[in-house]
Amino acid sequence: MGPARGLKKRRKIEKKPEQNAFASSEKERSIDWWDELSRKMNGPQSPSKGPDKFKSVFKISRRTFNYICSLVKEDMMAKSGSFTFSNGKPVSFEDQVAVALRRLSSGESLVIVGDLFGLHHSTVSQLTWRFVEAMEERGLHHLRWPSTEEEMMEIKSKFEKIQGLPNCCGVIDTTHVMMCLPSSDPASKVWLDHEKNHSMVLQAIVDAEMRFRDIVTGWPGKIDEWLVFQSSNFYELCDKGERLNGKNFMLPEGSEIREYIIGDVGYPLLPYLIIPYEGKELPELRAEFNKRHSATWLVAHRALARLKEMWKIIQGVMWRPDKHKLPRIILVCCLLHNIVIDLEDDVQDEMPLSHDHDSGYRQRVCGSVDIKGVHMRDKLSLYLSGKSPQ
């Protein structure tokens, strides 16, 4: 995973808990916390039963919620301090996680979330941050580059099934998280991007199932895609030959295709980063390659659209965020996005995908070309020209 700028050095990640660990005594509590919370939020006559009601509030299934609780419970419960609702009743651990997830998924203000739950807005802020810190510690194993050849082979196979691209290991794209900063803020000009918005960049490499495999965030939105990429740990590893260095794909005539990722024209053409051909009225072979490339690249576009659709705290314009904390919030939203995929939560199939995760941002062109990247792309084009779409 690439760095999330603003993160402090974290202690060594401990062994992840089993994903079925949440199927435990928590289910056996005599009084269901969700029934109580639902009554606080909507009144005593409000029905809380049924999965649809729960999903409408938290954007995830009850099963996924329980798993997330199992991840963060130890860290959150270890922190000192207790919280109470406005009626004087204590805020349970599940309530705390629920408040944080509501804040992240709805994007509503601290005041609105506080009013919904019967809490002061400062309590919502504290609970959200406790949750973010715990998820950073306990959820990082859900965002990682494939560690085995078998895992990478499965990813390549799924990408090839989209439009035939062989040996493709990922798709890269970038989005902007917009912020509302006061003009009096001396740093406001630093965060002003090319479209005159204050924003922070999130760059992500995803697999064929829209799972984030590497992210970089924390850079001002005016930094171009290729500069963010070239500053990343992923780029450094690739340049050293320590990433995208697995098995080559043998072509019929005897030449080979190395491992690579694909991106749009905002990135350089490299031996391990393949972008589409530029220009209008391209020859048929190049036009066909671009068609297949575009259909495959859409996986990353959809992943970022879904991320912002499910975790709306990073979808709109954030009101004067702490720019040191924001990268950590973005990271946790990416972890939650992956957890929904890893647990095969059917809520992901119910989420509408907006067409544009970066509305109002025009495509910027890098224009940098590596001759080895040119040869690699041409080999791919020739190979694909002899195949029908799968």
Image (cartoon, rainbow, N blue to C red):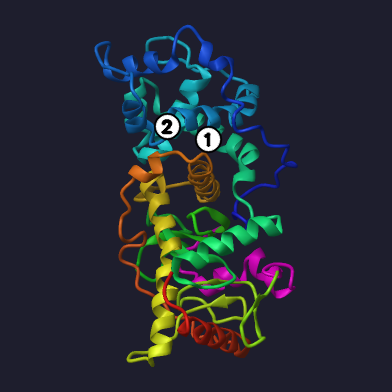
Residue at 51% over, 64% down: 159
Nearer-N-terminus badge (1/2) = 2
Give percent across and percent down for residue 131. Answer: 54, 33
Q: CA distance from mark 1 to mark 2?
A: 22 Å
Q: Quadrant of the N terminus?
A: bottom right
Residue toward you, 264 or 196? 264
* Left or right of residue 308: residue 173: right
Q: Is residue 139 magenta?
A: no
* Left or right of residue 348: residue 225: right
Q: Is residue 223 magenta?
A: yes
The magenta span reads 217-246
Q: Quadrant of the C terminus?
A: bottom left
Name the residue type under label 1: Trp
Residue toward you, 228 or 192? 228
Name the residue type under label 2: Ser
Residue at 63% over, 88% down: 253
Bin the neighbour count of mark 1 within 10 Å (Cα to Cα): few under 14, some 14-19, many 20 and up. Answer: some
Q: How many marks?
A: 2
Query: Do labels 1 and 2 touch, CB within 8 Å?
Result: no
Give percent across and percent down for residue 242. Answer: 74, 68
Residue reaching furthest top? 30
Up-down relation of residue 257 to residue 196 (above or below): below
Give percent across and percent down for residue 277. Answer: 44, 85
Q: Regarding mark 1 in the picture, which secondary structure is present there?
A: helix
Mark 2 highlights which residue? 61
Give percent across and percent down for residue 32. Answer: 44, 13
Mark 1 highlights which residue? 129
Up-down relation of residue 315 to residue 118 (above or below): below
